[in-house]
Amino acid sequence: MYVRFALIALVLLGGVFPIAVLAQSAADKSKLAYNEGLTLVRQQKYQEALAKFDESIQLDPQNYRSLYMKGLTLARLNRVQEAIEAYRRTAELAQRAKDARVEYLAHEQIGKIYTQQGKFDEALAAYDRALAIAPAANRAELLLAKGTVLIQQQNYEKAIPLLEEAVQSLKAADKGDAYWYLARAYNASGAFPKALEAAQKAVELIPGGPAQKAKAYFEMGQAYRGLGRYNEARDAFQKAAVGPYRQAALYELELLKNMN
């Protein structure tokens, strides 16, 4: 479900707890169980990892790192409603501990789940809570996430400024998709020159071959058609006619047959 599952756990949460001596207190035992859970996650033994995070939480109910990892593990097991509850509790405890990083991550994960479920209003609310407290370095990815939800709601007017801000500071690996979403929003709004520019950047930045870039070429074709540049639209749609965009691109080419 989440591509950077282990990375979020081990890097953003600061890795394992340092335990220099044999655990004696309940809090120390909780940290030890957390560490053991992380090891099991790395081994993709999610059911066993969940048991360790539950053990950690039972030993120390204030251990919000274990709650966060419980949420991630539940999501990995497709127990999404339980994951949401774990994330909500994580956010509450992290807020009390003044740990804004973990608090925003919990809200972000809630937003991802709601997006996947098609519960877009709930997703937007979660992303707004995350944006309110996220470090500046993490705002762009949240703006992109919120912008994509608004596109799915066909609220292009609100999506465009969020995506425009996001592309300014996203990592290069993420900019391609952001420009593709921008091209979609511009095309839907009739802003074809901007759509063309965004689609061209998406083609340049999206990694992979023709199948991966097809979606960007499709939006490029839409922009060229909107500008009345039909020969260039045909060329773009021909490049888009691979993979999942093949049928849609062929349909557009059929419509363009008698246009000059």
Image (cartoon, rainbow, N blue to C red):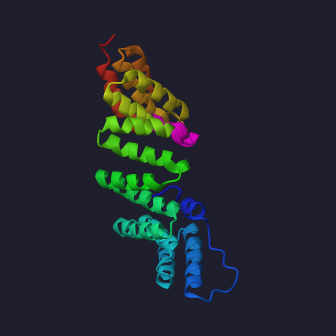
Q: Is residue 83 positioned above or below 145 on the image?
A: below
| Residue furthest bottom as drawn | 24
231 up-or-down from 99: above or below: above
| Quarter of the view holding residue 182 | top left
**x then y, percent, for residue 157:** 33, 35
Left or right, 199 with respect to 12, comes to: left
Looking at the picture, how far across and down is residue 5, in whole percent?
52, 60
Q: Is 245 drawn above or below residue 143 in the view shown?
A: above
Q: Split into 4 quadrants, where in the image is the C terminus? A: top left
Task: Please tell me whether the stretch drawn in magenta is mainly helix, strand or loop.
Answer: helix
Q: Is residue 115 magenta?
A: no
Q: For the N terminus, which image quadrant?
A: bottom left
- Residue at the spot x=55%, y=74% of the render? 37
Q: Percent x, y for residue 14? A: 61, 65
The residue sitting at the top extreme is 260
Q: Look at 63% across and 86% down and name the residue there.
A: 23
Identify the magenta region.
168-179
Q: Nearer the viewer, residue 221 or 7?
A: 7
Q: Quadrant of residue 122?
A: bottom left
